[in-house]
Image: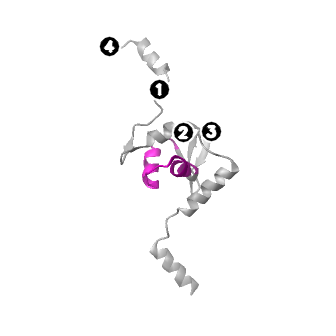
Amino acid sequence: MSATVEDLLKLLEEPDESPVSSHSVDGTKIGDFIGSFNITAGVDRLPNHVIWYTYKKVYGGELSKIEFFRQFKKEFIQVRTGKQRSYMLDGRSFDLSREGLIEAEFFAESHKRNKSGKEKKRRKVSKS
C-alpha cells in the first residue's frame, strides 16, 4: 500500500490534533501542563520565572525546576538575552499583568538556590 502525492499533501495540510506532549517524567506529564494552559509557540518572549511560577504555583506541578525545564525545552524554542533565559510562546496563556509579573519574580527570588561554599568564603574574607 503506497501513499499518493495527494494523500501526503493532505497530511501536511491537516493541523496537528495533539499539541500536548506525551513526555512523562517521574509519573507526571509535562504535556498535561501544556495542554491545560493551552501553551503554544508564539512571538512573545516569556522569561523562565513566569513559566516556572505558572507551573509550580498556579498548576501545582511536582517536578523540580531543572527537570521541568529539561522537558519544557524539548517542546519550545529557548532564547537568551544576556543572562536571562526565555521561551518564545504565546503570552495569552500566562498572567502578564504588572501584578502577575511582580508576583512571579518574587516567587523566583524566594526560591533561588544558596550560593556555593566557595563564594560564601570569599564574601567573609573580603568583609574582614
The numbered mark, 1 or 3, whose residue comes first in the sequence reads 1
Measure the alpha-carbon separation of dots 2 and 1: 16 Å
Residue that badge 4 annotates = 2
Report the amino acid beneath label 3.
Arg
Mark 1 burial class by Cα count in 10 Å: few <14, some 14-19, many 20+: few
Residue that badge 1 annotates = 17
- Identify which residue is drawn at 63% across, 45% down: 95
Quadrant (top left/top right/bottom left/bottom right) for the N terminus: top left
Residues 47 and 110: in front is 110
Measure the alpha-carbon separation of dots 1 and 3: 20 Å
Residue that badge 3 annotates = 92
| 16 horizontally vs 26: left or right | right
Query: Where does residue 75 sit, x and y in percent of width and height?
Result: 47, 40
- Identify which residue is drawn at 50% across, 74% down: 119
Measure the alpha-carbon separation of dots 3 and 4: 42 Å
Task: Confirm or deny contact between disc 1 and disc 3 (CB under 8 A).
Answer: no
- Dot in front, 3 or 2: 2
The image's mark for residue 37 is: 2
Q: Callout 2: helix, strand or loop?
A: loop
Q: How is the image coloured?
A: one colour
Report the amino acid beneath label 2.
Phe
The numbered mark, 3 or 2, whose residue comes first in the sequence reads 2
Measure the alpha-carbon separation of dots 3 and 2: 9 Å
Mark 3 burial class by Cα count in 10 Å: few <14, some 14-19, many 20+: few
